[in-house]
Amino acid sequence: MSNVPNNNPSTPDTTAVNTATGKLALGWALVGVPLAYGVYETLTRVAALFD
């Protein structure tokens, strides 16, 4: 056997990487979107204090 990686896109290794990447992106979106909204709301309300 050789130690050359298999570049076949249907191998379980690449499928696991693609699934993990999708879950990671979804996780960041679930956290990042509300966080960005909260930061935006906070900054707009702070700006209103100085008007």
Image: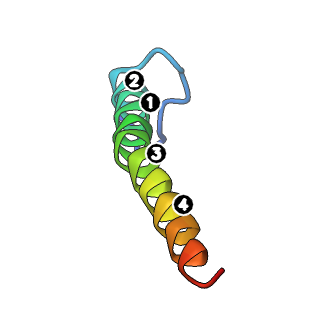
Q: Nearer the viewer, mark 2 or mark 4?
A: 4
User: In the figure, is residue 46 to the left or right of 27?
Assistant: right
Q: Which mark is residue 40?
A: 4
Between circles 3 and 4, the one closer to the viewer is 4
Mark 3 in CB contact with mark 2 (< 8 angstroms): no
The residue sitting at 48% across, 51% down in the picture is 37
Residue furthest toward the top? 10
Name the residue at the bottom extreme: 50
What scheme was used to colour the molecule?
rainbow
Task: Indicate the position of residue 5 as horizontal and vertical percent values.
Answer: 47, 39
The crowd level at tag 3 (other Cα within 10 Å; few <14, some 14-19, many 20+) is: few
Image quarter of residue 23: top left
Which image quadrant: the N terminus? top left
Tell how many labels. 4
Q: Earlier in the sequence, mark 3 or mark 2?
A: 2
Q: List the residue tagged with mark 2.
A: 15
Give the CA distance from mark 1 to mark 3: 22 Å
Frontmost of labels 4 and 1 is: 4
Amino acid beneath label 1: Asn
Q: Which mark is residue 39?
A: none
- First in residue order: circle 3 vs circle 4: 3
Residue shown at the point (36%, 39%) measured from the top left: 30
Q: Position of residue 7 (x, y in %)?
A: 55, 29
What amino acid is at disc 4? Tyr
33, 46: nearer the viewer? 46
Closer to us: mark 3 or mark 2? 3
Alpha carbon distance from label 3 to label 4: 11 Å
> For mark 4, does the 10 Å Cα neighbourhood hold few (<14), some (14 to 19), or many (20 or more) residues?
few
Query: Tag 4 or tag 2, which sits nearer the N-term?
Result: 2
Find numbered disc 3 in the image and state the secondary structure of the residue it sits on: helix
The residue at which mark 3 appears reads as 33
